[in-house]
């Protein structure tokens, strides 16, 4: 049997990091097994589904480089098949029309809530003639008197069981020509010959319903596997109140390799922390996906991103960080210290004269006049000096005469305009003699 899997996002917003993770695990499983991976937009929520979200999701999945094997499908395009299958169930008496009004159903739901009963609708229309009369919601007939346990072998969680009697006659269509998610998803998965359904744990309670639909339609079941959910820092399901949940919000600052690496490790223990998706493919086994959710910790993502940034060539880095054409030797000074691309602007002193207040030049144990005289001495000695690490360091130490801060502090400030920066000797080497002398000169003038 060749593996066929899909990710089926609802195009009701930007691609969520959790959906990206589901896409990744489906992709990894397909690639490891030599199978196929598909994307299907589930636009069964007509009010909230938008073409622009389909477009955004497509672009974002491409950015993550999770390639799919056939053109993307859209659920609503399969409507004639859904209608045909719904009519089939109605004519076979496996489904019926529920003529209860919204108000009646609402009152029932409230009562169940008050009595702390599980919400379900056991419909009085299912076994009488009116249930055959067109109009109203279409429901699947579910025998509430049955003591059947609907069980399935989840490829991640093992045996999962639900009592059939708790399901009620659940809705499968708003009308005979208007299928709901539960119904469309089953028909589409059957039509696409999906062999394994890997989706978020939040769908686990839908699976027994889907199993009953497969059975009613006479189709054999796929393998189900429910992926752990991403959690916020307080261990509740990740949501907007925890921070950005759209992949799009990470695109400017992070590399796709870092996002994929991070999401991959949030539900699976690979052999190393920094890992490419191709390496993950080699190792991936469905049964090893974690059962419990992991915290979406941006600090961890930042660290992973910093590791991937270091792998870029200087040219790639400058382009991605939007930097001017600075010499390549400057780049490691930035990438050694950078977590996110937008932080690169903090290093603008590497390619332009920094702006700073003269008070920054003052070392905490000295006065502004001490800074001035130290910088004057450095300026004088730098004019005619061999420009290498050892010579520069020896000269600065000599001027400092035991109190390094007296010289190193104002020099760092003069060169970078910052309290923290790479070592001033290192900085001098990458900036070059001419630029260093210019910057010290400016500093001295600021103090005059
Ligand atoms: N459309 C569902 C979602 O976005 C996925 C359903 C499924 O994978 O079966 O959560």
Image: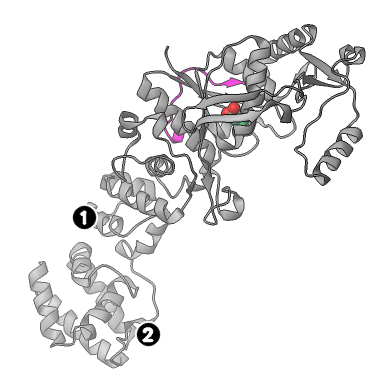
* Nearer to us in this view, 401 or 26: 26
Residue at figure coordinates x 18%, y 80% from the top left: 379
Crowdedness near tag 2: few (<14), some (14–19) or many (≥20) residues, C-alpha within 10 Å: some
Where is residue 411? Give x, y as percent.
25, 78
Is 317 magenta? The answer is: no
What label does residue 359 carry, if any?
A: 2
Crowdedness near tag 1: few (<14), some (14–19) or many (≥20) residues, C-alpha within 10 Å: few
> In the figure, residue 171 lies in which quadrant?
top right
C-alpha gap between disc 1 and disc 2: 30 Å
Q: Is residue 411 visible?
A: yes
Which quadrant of the figure contains the C terminus?
bottom left
Where is residue 51? Give x, y as percent.
65, 29
Where is residue 181? Give x, y as percent.
68, 25
Is 70 magenta? The answer is: yes
Give the residue at mark 1: 329
Which quadrant of the figure contains the N terminus?
top left
Side of 413 relative to 250 (left or right)? left
Region in magenta: 62-74
Looking at the image, in which quadrant does ligand 1 appear?
Answer: top right
Where is residue 72? Give x, y as percent.
54, 21
Examine the rendered structure and indicate whether residue 43 appears above or below residue 119.
Answer: above
Examine the rendered structure and indicate whether residue 352 appears above or below residue 169.
Answer: below
Examine the rendered structure and indicate whether residue 193 appears above or below residue 367.
Answer: above
**Magenta region, main secondary structure:** loop
> In the figure, residue 326 lies in which quadrant?
bottom left
Q: Are marks 1 and 2 in contact (CB under 8 Å)?
A: no
Of the two numbered discs 1 and 2 on the same chain, state the one appearing first in sequence. 1
Q: How many marks?
A: 2
* Nearer to us in this view, 179 or 303: 179
């Amino acid at each position: 049997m060749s593996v066929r899997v899909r990710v089926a996002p609802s195009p009701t917003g930007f691609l969520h990091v959790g959906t990206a993770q589901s896409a990744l695990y489906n992709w990894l499983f397909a690639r490891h097994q030599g199978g196929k991976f598909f994307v299907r937009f589930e636009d069964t929520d007509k009010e909230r589904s938008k073409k622009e979200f389909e477009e955004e999701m497509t672009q974002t999945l491409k950015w993550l480089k999770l390639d799919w094997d056939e053109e993307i499908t859209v659920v609503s395009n399969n409507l004639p098949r859904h209608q045909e299958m719904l009519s089939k169930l109605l004519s076979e008496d496996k489904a019926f029309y529920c003529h209860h009004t919204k108000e009646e159903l609402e009152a029932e739901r409230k009562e169940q809530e008050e009595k702390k009963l599980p919400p379900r609708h056991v419909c009085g229309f299912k076994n009488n003639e009116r249930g055959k009369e067109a109009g109203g919601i279409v429901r699947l007939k579910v025998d509430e008197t049955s003591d059947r346990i609907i069980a399935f072998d989840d490829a991640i969680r093992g045996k999962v069981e639900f009592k059939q009697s708790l399901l009620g006659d659940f809705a499968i269509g708003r009308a005979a020509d208007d299928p709901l998610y539960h119904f469309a998803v089953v028909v589409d998965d059957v039509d696409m010959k999906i062999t394994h359904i890997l989706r978020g744990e939040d769908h686990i309670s839908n699976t027994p319903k889907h199993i009953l639909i497969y059975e009613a339609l006479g189709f054999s079941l796929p393998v189900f596997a429910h992926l752990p959910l991403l959690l916020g820092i307080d261990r509740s399901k990740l949501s907007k109140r925890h921070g950005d949940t759209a992949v799009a919000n990470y695109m400017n600052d992070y590399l796709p390799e870092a996002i994929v690496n991070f999401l991959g490790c949030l539900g699976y223990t690979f052999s190393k922390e920094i890992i490419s998706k191709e390496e993950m493919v080699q190792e991936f086994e469905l049964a090893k996906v974690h059962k419990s959710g992991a915290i979406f910790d941006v600090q961890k993502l930042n660290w992973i991103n910093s590791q991937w940034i270091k792998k870029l060539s200087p040219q790639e880095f400058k382009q991605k960080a939007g930097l001017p054409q600075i010499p390549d030797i400057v780049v490691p000074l930035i990438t050694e210290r950078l977590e996110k691309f937008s932080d690169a602007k903090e290093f603008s002193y590497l390619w332009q004269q920094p702006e700073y207040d003269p008070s920054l030049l003052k070392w905490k144990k000295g006065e502004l006049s001490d800074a001035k005289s130290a910088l004057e001495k450095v300026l004088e000695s730098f004019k005619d000096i061999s420009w290498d690490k050892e010579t520069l360091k020896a000269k600065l130490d000599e001027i400092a005469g035991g109190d390094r801060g007296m010289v190193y502090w104002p020099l760092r400030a003069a060169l970078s305009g910052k309290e923290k920066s790479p070592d001033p000797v290192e900085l001098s080497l990458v900036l070059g003699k001419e630029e260093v002398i210019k910057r010290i000169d400016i500093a001295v003038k600021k103090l005059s």
